[in-house]
Image (cartoon, grey):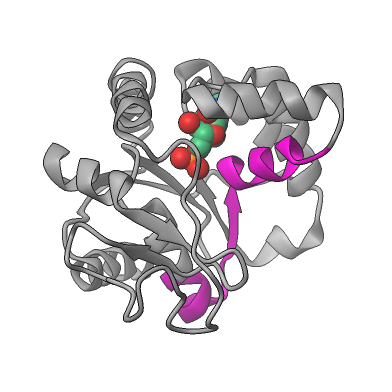
Amino acid sequence: MKNIILIAAPAAGKGTLSEMLVEKCNYVHISTGDLLRDASREKTELGEKIANMLQNGDLVTDEIVFELLEKRLENKDILNGYILDGFPRTLEQAKKYDELSKKLHIDLGVVIVLDSEYETLKKRIVGRMLCPKCGSVYNTLTGVNTPKVSGICDKCGESLYKRSDDNEESFKNRYDTYLEKTKPLIDYYKEKGNLYFVNSEDKEEMLKSTLEILND
Ligand code: AMP
């Protein structure tokens, strides 16, 4: 299966699309945000440093991101196809990733840009609730995926939590960072000729369009 790089503003649907592709096509999902959140829970100086950067919505340094990513890509489970969610975030990272993929003999695959309106994104972030046990994602503002019982996971009954960076101020910061640092990647991959756009307002439509690209 083709490897996938997802480029998207915060809450544009990277996590949701990844979850559906894992279920439908057995993709391996690699989220640098998840790798960093795991690392931030370690009670070390590095863990605390990462936790602070995440809390403010700032980008974590390339040195840290690449160390975690390279370790993850050395795992053989990626050979059937993987989704990169949240990476690359900058032009610099994209260029370094080209080198890393050459070194590890990994194919770049396709790059998919997820498109949603600003107001949709804000509601998705500010209302987002997550299940720590099964990873299900809910929302209390958009009217889509509202938990049946407030604060409780429909699937496994666990108490839901909010990510510490899912607030309005951090959203604005993350969105501005996306415009400034990540959006330029669109031109970078357009030149390489492996770029596709997918509307991500509706999740079923988003999946359908993505499968069309993958089966092309
Ligand atoms: P995400 O889960 O993709 O929304 O990422 C959450 C946070 O993790 C971001 O706001 C950044 O602080 C950090 N992060 C995730 N991926 C990267 C990356 N590729 N480079 C730098 N920081 C990242």
- Closer-to-camera residue (191/197): 197
- Closer-to-camera residue (164/171): 164
Specify whether residue 107 is painted magenta.
no
- Closer-to-camera residue (61/188): 61
In the image, is residue 48 above or below residue 73?
Answer: above
In the image, is residue 61 above or below residue 48?
Answer: above
Residue drawn at (82%, 39%), measured in percent from left and top? Answer: 42
Drawn side of residue 133 relative to residue 90, left or right: right
**Visible in this render: residue 154?**
yes
Drawn side of residue 15 relative to residue 108, left or right: left
Q: Looking at the picture, how far across and down is residue 29, in whole percent? A: 58, 59
**Visible in this render: residue 104?**
no
Image quarter of residue 154? bottom left
Residue drawn at (32%, 45%), measured in percent from left and top? Answer: 125
Residue drawn at (27%, 71%), measured in percent from left and top? Answer: 146
In the image, is residue 61 above or below residue 12?
Answer: above
Query: Magenta region's main secondary structure?
Result: helix
Q: Looking at the picture, how far across and down is residue 1, in whole percent? A: 53, 66
Q: Quadrant of the C terminus?
A: bottom left
Residue drawn at (56%, 68%), measured in percent from left and top? Answer: 27
Q: Which residues are magenta?
A: 20-42
Specify whether residue 33 is painted magenta.
yes
Image quarter of residue 144? bottom left
Q: Looking at the picture, how far across and down is residue 70, in whole percent? A: 76, 37
Count the labels in the image: 0
For this orientation, the residue located farthest to the right is: 44
Q: Looking at the picture, how far across and down is residue 164, in whole percent? A: 50, 39
